[in-house]
Amino acid sequence: MKLKLDKYTLILILIIAAGLFFRLYKSVIYLPYGHDNDLEGWVIKDILLNKHLRLVGQETSTQGIYIGALYYYLLIPFYLLAKMEPTGGIILSAVLGAFTIWSVYFVFKEVFKKKEIGLIGAGICAVAYGFVMNDRGNVPTTPVILWSVWFLYAIGSLLSKKNTKSFVLLGVLTALTWHLNVTLVLLTILIPVALIITRWKLDFRKVFWGLSAFFVTSIPFIAFELRHNFLQTRAVSLSFLVNQGSELTLVEQGKRVLHIFSQVVTNVLWYPAQKLYFLLPLILLGALIFLVVKKKISKSFAGILLIWSTLPVAFFSFYSKSVSEYYLNGVLVIALSVISLSLNFLLTSKYRVIGFLLLGLFAYINIYKFFTYQDSRQGYVWRRALVLEIKKDAKAHGYPCVSVSYITNPGYELGYRYFFWLEGMHVNRPDSQSPVYTIVFPLRSIFPEDKSFGSLGLIYPDYKRYTREGVEKSCSGQNSNLTDPLFGFTE
């Protein structure tokens, strides 16, 4: 029996293959590595070695609020496959990336009723530099785009009144916000909005199954709150009363949020969006209105897309938080939707030449950016090599332990402890009198390094200062690398 594939399936397979290529190309060399990745390894070590079935992952930038543990559990089999090396996360990122590309195709095909729109969306997701680098990030917020795609599907199902299983899906997705980015819970406002638009009549059976799915998926969160006296619930309430780090005025905060929103949207087509970043959101707004006029999208669905885009902007304009791009990544699927609809309109009209030219320009800009990309040369490869050099040099000089100091800006001294543990090293604080190895970043002429690793520098100890007896005494205590608190990590 021969398996026959239609042209849409063949094109989709090629798109996914291209997406995997971009997500895996030089993935080890360009694997970013910092404090969040260090914490991932530390959490996984805690689960596997300490047999600690964790309910939460790392603490977020808001004190008392933690991210759920789902992403860390997903990483475990890949870490084991890679012998506990962080490179195992590359495989998970590729799997999630491929699934996201397929999900865009499926959801756009179902919601917008045309396979061609699904293929356009999937193609953009596969090649766009912003989407590719998001998937290569290897952090718990990486699946936010995947979540957003399926939330769009669920809301679209409510609007089309084909909502037999939408409530179950919405229940699961709402509960998963804690595991990805808790600010996604803002988008749940779209659920009652969609129900009001469709004049939905209360169906207790559907509500029951939706709430059941929510509570079952929320068991880890509920268990943690009960065990810790509703710590996170109280922290969320307090966060609205206490300044969360932003020193901007209300007007300045609003401008900054709009600036970041515009950059996030523009990143769909070109990256980084440093110039003319404000144009694409305005163009897409005009395109959305045009699509409504041409009846390519319903007024109700267009309204949902507008509210979806406005909610996070409005919230963070008034919330005293220093906002980063990942807080607004949930709007990427809105930009992708409007772009895909607009390109499909062009490609199926007398303006198809313009559509093909725009697709070609998009592909050229993003592929060129990808192949000319240069990382900061302080990621996984360089940090791993530096730690191995410290271990090698310490062994050559007979040091049973070392200490490490840093010449860098605050925050950049983080992201090494998991590597020290992985190499079985005893690492103390510099005041322990253990031989001091100094890591420098970025390289500076006033602090000449003995050896460089990318943009990282290493200064060896002043060997003549240390005696065998003194070193042995300094190494007789606890391993500070294991016992000192790790920022963002909780037992």
Image (spheres, rainbow, N blue to C red):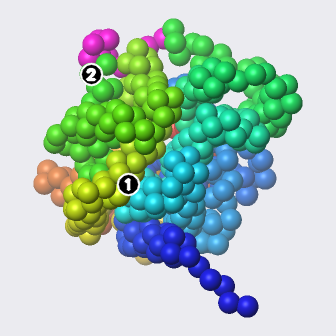
Does 344 appear above or below 312? below
x and y percentages locating residue 2 in the rendered image: 68, 90
The boundaries of the magenta stretch are 242-252
* Picture quadrant where residue 379 is located: bottom left
Cα distance between the residues tagged 2 and 1: 33 Å
Count the numbered circles shown: 2
Q: Secondary structure at mark 1?
A: helix
Left or right of residue 396: residue 438: left
- Dot 2 and dot 1 residues touching (CB under 8 Å): no
Which label number is shown at residue 3?
none
Does 302 appear above or below 342? above
x and y percentages locating residue 104 in the rendered image: 52, 54
Mark in the foreground, 2 or 1: 1
For the question of whether residue 31 can be seen, the reply is no
Q: Residue at x 21, y 37 (%)?
A: 279
Which label number is shown at residue 344?
1
Left or right of residue 461: residue 186: right
x and y percentages locating residue 108 in the rendered image: 52, 51
* Picture quadrant where residue 327 is located: top left
Q: Residues within 10 Å of mark 2 (few under 14, many from 20)?
A: some
Q: Amino acid at mark 2?
A: Lys
Question: What residue is shown with label 2?
Answer: 255
